[in-house]
Amino acid sequence: LLTSGTAIAKEKAVVTLSNLAYNNDENKVTIAEAGAISPLVNLLTSGTAVVKEKAAGALRNLAVKNDENKAFIAEAGAIPPLVNLL
């Protein structure tokens, strides 16, 4: 759903991943290993304004207290689009 489907479906998928990652170290690892970081980064530039905001929040939740995910997020090119959202 992160790479196809309607804007509403993408938004719901992003929110679900964000909620699963919130304060759950095991889920953060599982989500990253499932390959969700790159699609979330892509949504920072290709999604609706709401999806971009929610994708940024999901990436935040994945990065909190997880240095490996921070590196994956940076390597996936998230920093320039995040700066553009400011």
Image (cartoon, rainbow, N blue to C red):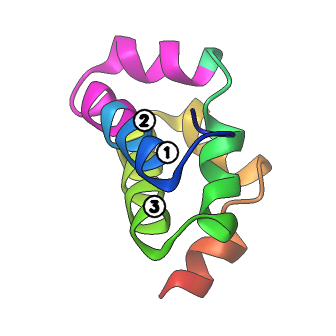
The one of 84 and 66 positioned closer to us in this rendering = 84
Q: Position of residue 50 (x, y in %)?
A: 39, 68
Q: CA distance from mark 1 to mark 3?
A: 7 Å
Residue 61 pos. (x, y %): 35, 43
> Magenta residues?
17-32
Q: Give yes or no for contact between labels 1 and 2 (Cβ–Cβ under 8 Å).
A: yes
Give the residue type at disc 3. Val
Quadrant position of residue 53: bottom left
Crowd class of label 3 (few under 14; some 14 to 19; many from 20; radius 10 Å)? many
Q: Which mark is residue 10?
A: 1
* Extreme-left residue of the structure: 23
Question: What is the distance, in whole Å, between disc 1 and disc 2 at their CAs?
Answer: 5 Å
Per the model, the C-alpha gap separating discs 2 and 3 is 10 Å
Residue 64 makes an appearance in the image? no
Residue that appears at 40% across and 51% down = 60
Residue annotated with mark 2: 13
Q: Pick whichever of labels 2 and 3 is earlier in the sequence.
A: 2
**27 falls in the magenta region:** yes
Name the side, left or right, on which 33 lies relative to 86: right
Q: Would residue 41 be counted in the magenta stretch?
A: no
Which residue is under mark 3? 51
Our reading of the magenta stretch's main secondary structure is helix
